[in-house]
Image (cartoon, rainbow, N blue to C red):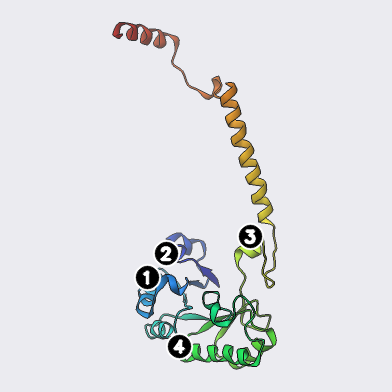
Amino acid sequence: MLSVPPSMMCDPRFRTAAPDCFAVPGDNFFEIGGPEDFLRWALPLYKAGADAVYCSGSLASVRLLAEHAIPVCGHVGLIPSKCTWTGGFRAVGKTLDMAKLVWEQVRALEDAGAFAAEIEVVPHSIGQLIAERSSLFLISMGAGPGYDAQYLFADDVLGQNGGHVPRHAKVYRDFQSEYARLQAERIAAFGEFVADVKDGSYPAQQHAVDSNEEVVEAFRDWLDQEA
């Protein structure tokens, strides 16, 4: 199962590269709009080969997509684009009231016709109880084990981000250091190029083409006559 940028989903090369992956393109609801906007956005993606779409928008948007036979993956718990409503970028479900909220989000998505939901940064004991009682295919993002799937950004897996790394992320490679090394090499290479141009060592004879001497002489004579 892959979370796919919409532009990649619409590129025919994607299905050539990943013919059997369950592809779920998505975008923030504020980039798309309301229910009708979501439907207009989703239909070309489904036509391009998407298996489902991600929707963090309204329940009305989820319901309309499902009514038009578009499989929908919703989002519960910490929803970054809606985190103002749950106290910012922190775990959702640590108190009884907030745990009830996550459960109500799950039930609401079930009723709206979603088949799955990303459950993000929910205490794992709370999430486990919800997973045992929900019909949704639940995808954990920092919500612990015990779900149907685990979600981790490629940037985290590859270590491509600098600065803060989320607690739930596990870094398997250090691409950031490699990018820093390449940047240093890039700067050095351009500096050497500038220095070579200034001291005349570039371009050297092997970097240029020339005509034979007879042509050069004939052209010089012609220019002298023209002048």
- Asked if marks 2 and 1 touch (Cβ < 8 Å), the reply is yes
Residue 186 versus residue 145: which sits nearer the camera? 186
User: Tag 1's secondary structure?
Assistant: helix
Residue beneath disc 3: 161
Say which mark, if any, is on residue 113.
4
Task: Find the distance from the CA under tag 2 to the CA under tag 1.
Answer: 8 Å
N-terminal-most mark, 2 or 1 = 2
User: Tag 2's secondary structure?
Assistant: loop
Say which mark, if any, is on residue 182.
none
Q: Mark 3, residues whose alpha carbon is within 10 Å: few (<14), some, or many (≥20)?
A: some
Residue beneath disc 1: 44
Q: Residue at x 66, y 55 (%)?
A: 176
User: Relative to 196, is 53 on the left or the right?
Assistant: left
Q: Find residue 78 and report its horizontal and vertical position in percent.
A: 58, 79
Q: Find residue 32 and report its horizontal and vertical position in percent.
A: 41, 72
Residue 201 seen in render: no
Say which mark, if any, is on residue 10.
2
Q: In which quarter of the image is the N terminus?
A: bottom right
Task: Find the distance from the CA under tag 4 to the CA under tag 2.
Answer: 25 Å
Task: Find the distance from the CA under tag 4 to the CA under tag 1.
Answer: 20 Å
